Image (cartoon, grey):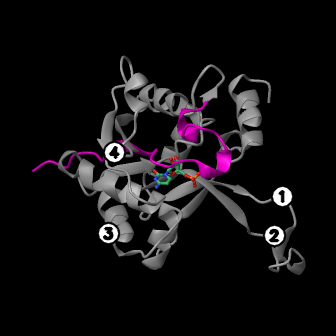
């Protein structure tokens, strides 16, 4: 049987409630530069010729997704978000299983990172497509790091050399990623689950524009990037 080339799929966990954003609607639907945040992400993946299909995981009660998923955004909606990001990603992977081979790549990307560009997706894929493990976009830390005590005092300064802040997409082969997330106890990103298996994901330099929108102040900053002012 001839070998078929591995394909690239996107999986967007978008089932969070965004408690830290302080907004009345889930943060992935907050308007940003004229469109809901999640729509920016879906448009970026839809415009990327290298991505075969995008899956988006929303909570079963989500009442917003249908208003933005039509027309050009040919994504598959998985209405089965979990209690944590970890659970939502795993539910998404299970929903994809009949359409994806174990050796196909999955790029997991937060709905709350609207600054991702097609160029960053291509940069990540070019760096990892021949890699045995996979990896993630990340940024070397520039600030000096302090470990805090419970009462907000410095316990110690942590050397920042060789420290990186993890971003998304995080890109791993379907079979490995599913096994890793099924075995991991509770992880905040995919790379951590791969690390538990004793493997070392590759760090690929990302961009400050790919920030995660978490608090209200981040919305203004993300808008500056999306409007091309920063
Ligand atoms: O809350 P946080 O910013 O860490 O969420 C990162 C991403 O994970 C967001 O896109 C959010 O919608 C998603 N998420 C999810 N299911 C949860 C919690 C978060 O899909 N239960």
In which quadrant of the rendered view does residue 174 lie? bottom left
Closer to the chain start, of discs 4 and 3, is 4
For disc 1, the neighbor class at 10 Å (few under 14, some 14 to 19, many from 20) is: few
Q: Mark 1 or 4, which is nearer the eye? A: 4
**Left or right of 126, for residue 74:** left
What label does residue 179 carry, if any? 3
Front residue of 18 and 1: 18
Mark 1 element type? loop
Check whether the beta carbons of the residues at disc 2 and disc 1 lie within 8 A of each other.
yes
* Majority SS type along the magenta span: loop
The C terminus: image quadrant: top right
Mark 3 → mark 1, Cα distance in angstroms: 34 Å
Where does the image place residue 15, in percent across and percent down from the top left? Answer: 45, 47
Which residue in the protein does label 4 denote? 60
Start-end of magenta stretch:
1-30
Mark 2 → mark 3, Cα distance in angstroms: 32 Å
Q: Residue at x 66, y 22 (%)?
A: 33
Which residue in the protein does label 1 denote? 142
Report the residue that reaches farthest toward the top: 71
Mark 3 element type? helix
Where does the image place residue 111, in percent across and percent down from the top left? Answer: 52, 42
């Amino acid at each position: 049987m001839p070998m078929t080339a591995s394909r690239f799929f996107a999986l967007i966990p978008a089932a969070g409630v965004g408690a830290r954003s302080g907004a009345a609607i889930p943060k992935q639907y907050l308007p940003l530069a004229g469109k809901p945040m999640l729509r920016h992400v879906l448009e970026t993946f839809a415009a990327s010729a290298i991505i075969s299909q995008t899956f988006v995981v929303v909570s079963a009660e989500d009442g917003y997704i249908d208003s933005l998923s039509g027309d050009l955004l040919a994504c598959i909606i998985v209405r089965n978000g979990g209690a944590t990001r970890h659970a939502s990603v795993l539910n998404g992977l299970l929903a994809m299983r009949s359409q994806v081979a174990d050796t196909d790549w999955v790029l997991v990307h937060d709905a709350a990172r609207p600054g991702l560009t097609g160029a960053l997706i291509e940069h990540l894929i070019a760096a990892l497509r021949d890699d045995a493990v996979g990896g993630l976009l990340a940024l070397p830390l520039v600030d000096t790091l302090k470990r805090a005590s419970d009462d907000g005092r410095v316990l110690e300064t942590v050397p920042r050399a060789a420290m990186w802040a993890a971003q998304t997409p995080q890109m791993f082969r379907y079979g490995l990623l599913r096994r890793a997330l099924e075995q991991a106890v509770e992880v905040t990103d995919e790379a951590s689950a791969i690390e538990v298996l004793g493997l070392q994901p590759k760090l690929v330099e990302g961009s400050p524009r790919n920030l995660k929108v978490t608090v209200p102040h981040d919305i203004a900053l993300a808008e500056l990037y999306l409007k091309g002012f920063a």
